[in-house]
Image (tube, rainbow, N blue to C red):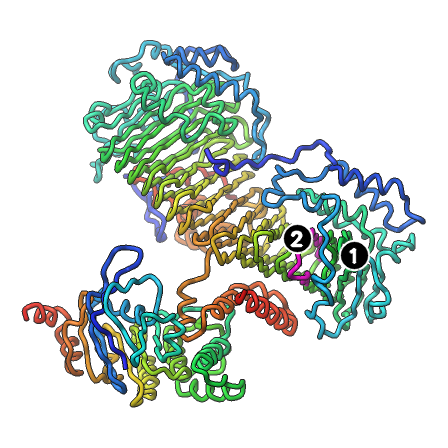
Amino acid sequence: MPEAATIQTPAVEGAPRLSPAAQQLQARLAATPPPHARATDAARTDALDRLSAQGLPGPRDEYWRYTDPAPFNTQAPDPIALDAASGDPTLFAGVDKLRLVFVDGRFDAAASDELSLAGVEIAPLSQADAQPDHWVGDAYGALEKQGQSPAARPFAALNTAIATDGAVIRVTGRAARPVQILYRRSDPAADVTIHHVLRLEAGADLTLLENGLVGARGNIVIEADLAPGAQLHHVAAHRAGVPRVSNIHLFGRVAEGASLKSFALSVDGRHLRTESVIELLGDDAVAHVACAMLGDGTSVHQDDTVFITHTGLRGESRQVFKKVLKNGATGVFQGKILVRPGAQKTDGYQISQALLLDENSQFLAKPELEIYADDVKCSHGSTTGALDETALFYLRSRGVPRERAVVLLVLSFLADALEEVEDEALRAEIADRLEEWLTARAKG
Amino acid sequence: MLQINNLHVALEDEDKQILKGVTLTVPAGQVHAIMGPNGSGKSTLSYVLSGRDGYEVTEGQATLEGHDLLEMEPEERAAAGLFLAFQYPVEIPGVGNMTFLRTAVNAQRKARGEDELSAGEFLKLVRERAKALDIDAEMLKRPVNVGFSGGEKKRNEILQMAMLEPRMCILDETDSGLDVDAMRLVAQGVNALRAPDRSFLVITHYQRLLDHIVPDVVHIMNDGRIVKSGGPELALEVEQNGYADILAEVADA
Amino acid sequence: MTVQDAPEIEVREGVDRETVETVASMGSYKYGWDTEIEMEYAPKGLNEDIVRLISQKNEEPEWMTEWRLAAFRRWQTMTEPSWAMLNYPEIDFQDQYYYARPKSMAVRPKSLDEVDPKLLATYEKLGIPLREQEILAGVEGADAAPADVRRVAVDAVFDSVSVGTTFQDELAKAGVIFCPISEAIRKHPELVKKYLGSVVPQSDNYYATLNSAVFSDGSFVYVPPGVRCPMELSTYFRINAENTGQFERTLIIADKGSYVSYLEGCTAPKRDTAQLHAAVVEIVILEDAEVKYSTVQNWFPGDEEGRGGIYNFVTKRADCREPRAKVMWTQVETGSAITWKYPSCILRGEESQGEFYSIAITNNMQQADTGTKMIHLGKNTRSRIVSKGISAGQAQNTYRGLVSMHPRATDSRNYTQCDSLLIGDRCGAHTVPYIEVKNSSSRVEHEATTSKVDEDQLFYCRARGMDEEEAVALVVNGFCRDVLQALPMEFAMEAQALVAISLEGSVG
């Protein structure tokens, strides 16, 4: 009997089991108490307690069925030579924005723009933390904690416990310019834990751009709390072409009439898991999560795990995930729509598609619906397959060379995900970048 | 222009012979029609000539202006001047019609060693040719064939033909699914492209398209062979008596 | 099906008139009566002695006893799985009878004529024909001359034993073996030894291992090469005794180029305490052979408050072992308090095909976690999954499925359509598909939707004079159409009627 013929989905064992790595972190924290009281101290202690109780995931953990948690938990990441991704990425370079620079996970004031933008309060976490009565003390870790149930996310708890820095942003009106978080490195082995806290007050509007290379390994948490009517547009593009290891969590809470839209461009990398955990708490709330992913090579393993909870009435959620895989790359999608009792008139949609460009790549998906309200419209679709030979022939019969035709068809495949970027200029820029990458790779 | 000699073709996957010795010559400037009942091999001929996968040529040759077509990749055949108007044009979501056309035009120009058209030149040309086919700016903006009606798809095929200016055009059941008005529009587009150095092979089941695109020669195809050739009157004969009579006559002969 | 004074009702396309008529003519769970009959039981509880006792009652050879004991020892080391979305009180496996048979069966009847008339009457009351006459199976009260007379051979299993199998002689003429598995173990040990446990190994899962240790009876089918089974085969399972688990085992072997269609039905009396049912079905399909396996599962679902009902833990698996083997599972799951069941296909042979059509209806406090596994191992294999889940009352209904394309299973295809319907705002409908694609030439498509019963359709029906329950039954039957069409005709009508009955009390 082949192993795969059995759906074995063991429950997480309840006993606390802290890996040696986590024990070491715990010991380090205990040995070096912070120099002064921090606003986030209570949240950090709580996170560490929770982490100790739940333990780190093991290989038999159902939520880690398709992705090995070990690389997020080794003592130190494999270094990535500094010249491997030297210089800032050109993506978003032309956008008029306020730029925050983090080097090896620490805020770099000199490299950043002046933190002044109408309708927006910005501070690095390291500074906000030093003010014991700063609002971040209440917000820090709150959504992360809520996002631990029903599925545990231990690396997010670990992040809350030990994050060194981050951006703390409160938006009260319409931000005049996008805020960019730009990651840089000075240490090839940088193992970065960074935690951003966003609070959008009623009616606020912010575009958050995030790119660069956070470190050889990155553990990033973003908590985004949206008050009624607020709008957050999040566009992330983590640095392509390097064997980065990263575990990213986006925790969102969306109040009445508010809207959270997040798009990620993900190109290569080594071992990546991005979890989006969003609750539509208020009525008429909206959440869109999308990703366009390109993976080339056996070392590429990229996992998108999404958990959307509908609590309010008439919520609308969309998940659009497109993965293009070649030369042995692995794509993973775990997406869930949970509709709580009473969340009537929910409109939940989810699509996950993989394009496998050769025989060796694989796509592993678990698109779930869990629904406890009847007046809902929920659907999900998932397809996996090779390029459409008929379309390829059509293009070639018009004189388009094969390589170019493949690029066009891959772009066609990704188009639905890109559509989720609302800003037309940003969308066009990302499309151009994708095309360049695809064209360069098609030759290689 | 196009020379097909004793062409035998089988399906790659199943050991099934579709074309059993097709011989056909289309001289420059002429319009030839191929008619035949369903399953006679008409569409297979168009696919094999344009290089679609899944067919195996077991015998025979096909040349375009002396160049061996069967040795070429599909895009090389296109650059050599071959164009197939598809029976079922393919939808490509996310790729704009304009982008598609421009990519195709410039790829062919490049393959022929010509300069690429500038954005301005290209735009001017498209607008002009689209207008003749009643294709509006909106249709040019939309993704390739996505959400197009049957008539719009076929007009779009002819627009591509007009833009790519091929030497040898194959129209595969271009009239299928078209009403009379749409067919007239398509036929006008094709007729406008008739020229002394351009040939057409019009594949159709019915005679009605040939009222609008009048052929020089009509071939009747059955069971993988050309069984009879003649002038336009042959098409009328099919229209009046159906295929059965002609096939019976051929069988007797 | 004929019903007197059929009401004049406008019937929408996709829904048969019978449904409407049946709703009017039938009550709720109508198989809930029991048969008063003298029974003999093995002592309560489970240990090696009980396993030996079951083996001895079945007059089994030593190798079979040892096979059971090995399974039992394995089972003792295992823990009950908890990953399904099912909530039920812990099962006390020692508080069950593992063997119960009517006293009259102590001496094996030589033919149906020797079977206790009370037992025969039980099946007659259930509408299961145990006489070898031409019947229209599955349709009761067929007083008019049936239009399409078909014969069905029946193996009737009552608690732990098979009480009789019809048409055995006629089937034997065609070379088909159809008998209780207890008999097959004695008479056809070479076939049983070769195939038993070859699809569902002893160690497969907790319930299958338990079954391997304690199965008491079930059906055995062998269709020889090139034979198209001359009639449909069926097994009817009846649980009658209280506090008794039923553990049946079915083994079907379709040799090269053969064909068989197999039907399975199940009912049990209304009892206040839950009862355990853990079955294993293994199907082996060789080159160019085809098996259709249809189930109408109508175990007692428990009452409106969730008291009683059958806990149904079933492992069903077909192994398309050789090229171009084909299997089709069709199931209509309307009964049981708890359903845990994933009829699966191992597509090992090149160009083999697996299909799974399922209707699962849960009402009141019922819970179902059911679906399938399509394991593509061979090249050019095809599979199709159509699942329709309907939830009403406070019920929870989960589709759980796996589609796996192995690296070697090139050029394969899967299509999955998985729809859920919710009736009322206190129930739940869940979809948990696993999709694992490890080669690029295969194509996998999965679609799932969840919605409520269409208000416009309901209104349309009611405007034509139907009451709300009739209207719901009608619309739900339309929703299930794709699956109903996959059933053999005999079962399709019974299934339509069941859909209507299962949803009684779900509206208003």
Give residue C147's position: percent from left, percent from top: 21, 40
- Identified by mark 1, the residue type is Asp
Crowding at dot 1, Cα within 10 Å, few <14 / some 14-19 / many 20+, comes out as some
Residue A154 screen position, x and y as percent: 72, 43
Q: Chain of mark 2?
A: A
- Which quadrant would residue B235 be assigned to in this image? bottom left
Marked residue nearer the N-terminal end (1 or 2): 1
Q: Nearer the viewer, mark 1 or mark 2?
A: 1
Q: Which residue is mark 1?
A: A187
Q: Which residue in the rendered view is the most extreme toward the right?
A: A36
Instruction: Inspect the image, locate mark 2, and give the three-letter code of the amino acid beneath it.
Output: Thr
* Residue A235 figure quarter: bottom right
Name the spot of residue C481 as percent of width and height, x first. 38, 47
| Residue situated in front as seen by the camera: C180 or C19 | C180
Left or right: A134 in relation to C364: right
Taking the spot 49% from the left edge, 72% from the top edge, the residue there is: B143
